[in-house]
Image (spheres, rainbow, N blue to C red):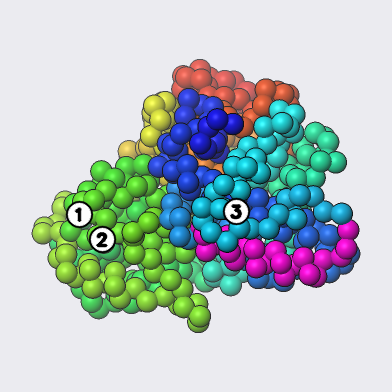
Amino acid sequence: MDNVMFCYQCEQTNGGKGCTKMGVCGKTPEIANLQDLLIYQLKGIACYGKAMLDNGKEIDKEVIHLIENGLFTTLTNVNFDDGAHIQLLREAQSVKENIRSQAPEGIYPEVALYNLSDTKESMLKDAVKAGIMYDQDLDADIRSLRSTILYGLKGISAYGHQARFLGYNSEQVDSHYIIGLEAIVNDNFTVEELIRMTMRTGQISIEVMRVLDEANTTVYENPTPNKVNVSVKKGPFIIVSGHDLKDLDMLLQQTEKKGIHIYTHGEMLPSHGYPGLKKYKHLVGNYGSAWQNQQKEFDNIPGCILMTTNCLMRPRETYKDRIFTTNVVGWEGIRHVRVKEDGTKDFSEVIEKALELGGFEKNEEKKEILVGFGHNATLSHAEDIVKAVKEGKIKHFFVIGGCDGARPGRNYYTELATIIPKDCIILTLACGKYRFNKLDFGTVAGLPRLLDVGQCNDVYSAVRIATALADAFDTDVNALPLTIVLSWYEQKAVADLLALLSLGINRMFLGPSLPAFISPNVLQYLIDTFQLTPISIPEEDLKTSLRQHV
């Protein structure tokens, strides 16, 4: 506890053990401790909320909204602004006081009774003094499972936030924020009960992805295959990064006929498959690649960047004047676009800056990649796929995707994709796709060999595709000639992994390294129960995959 901070929630945590002086992500000890304090406050709120649920009382949506925003704010590479954290902490104290007045009388743990100090300095002292930074005295397996549940909830909150912004939510998800947070401070929970809660969190992850899929496809229609230009065009422009389709939609509406080109970036690439978005002619393409390259790719560009969700890196001085944030994203000194009471946003400041900067001076030679193979589009070819498998034209399916990152070893995913036999189909999703999505994989049985199913939340699409194929072959997913190879970086990937485990999917590969918060005993449980396997070298993992499904 001599450390000024402790965080091990992401894959790139220092030394594979934990960041103790400065976050690899750029998070300072001050921000880390404010985030720990915020999570502590949310746990306290959950204790009162769980008591209310147990007594048949409803939880006000204001409470759920605060918990969801608080969890999302603490997810890796989302918010580095101390002012935003102070504001959230004060809101959390107000919510806690209100829910405390409604909760039944009883004996509550210290985390619920804790009252926030008034000043930032006092908050930081209290965070350290209360031992909020790390559950150091816990049994290693209890601590590991509590951390896994918490990080799963953080991932779920990101998806829940996106769905709620479009007017969709799930009562199951809303209740589980309360139930899950209370479980990780309840000292009566055994290892076995925490394992069950971990699997329940995976089930809730499936549910929140289902709701987000419903929101996106209802508002913007089901994605369809679409070629996306990945070169730049002459003229003023705005790059939209993150995941939030509604922000992109509002910006497209406000920039129509203004002579501004809109590019997607990172995980916004799948937006080009949605009919409700690709109808805009000035949505001209995708700029750059995955999140970890943004400092280089945004360096001195003559246009603006809008960050709608994670993943934000420390902005360089060369583009600090032209990057904007919105939703729960933030960095001290960066201009923030707030949502108005009617649910809309005014992007005029971004638009004016883009026009002022002038944009690219010339067109690049056009180059295109293919997106839009969500479950609806892919399953429209289900009969052809089943026929091709039965005829031996398609031998195996690989799902290769997840979070990308900068740590050495991620070339594994590129190398694996390129050595997969030509009679196999690759489904990809999330920003991990940037490791190989500009390569030409050709076709098999009349279908593209590389099918981009969407964002990280579109693990749901991959599951829908897999279960539909299993039904067609009158078997289960584990009996399909299917291999899932996941790359992880942050907590949405944790939620995705728990979702797949909760469905009983076996023999998945995970990399580039294993989570620091997984204890040896918990890891052994995952290996024994689900045959979860760390990646090794592409050639060996490919042989193993093909041999398992002969």
Q: CA distance from mark 1 to mark 3?
A: 36 Å
Q: CA distance from mark 1 to mark 2?
A: 9 Å
Q: Quadrant of residue 447?
A: top left
Give the residue drawn at x 68%, y 70%.
61
Q: Which residue is mark 2?
A: 322
Amino acid, disc 3: Leu
Q: Which mark is residue 38?
A: 3
Q: Which residue is mark 1?
A: 301
Q: Are marks 2 and 3 in contact (CB under 8 Å)?
A: no
Give the residue drawn at x 71%, y 47%.
201
Location of residue 317 with respect to 6 vertically, above or below = below
Residue 307 horizontal/vertical position (percent): 38, 58
Q: Which mark is residue 331?
A: none
Q: Quadrant of the N terminus?
A: top right
Give the residue drawn at x 30%, y 76%.
348
- Which range is magenta? 85-106
| Mark 3: few/some/many CA within 10 Å (<14, 14-19, 20+) | many
Q: Is residue 12 left or right of residue 365?
A: right
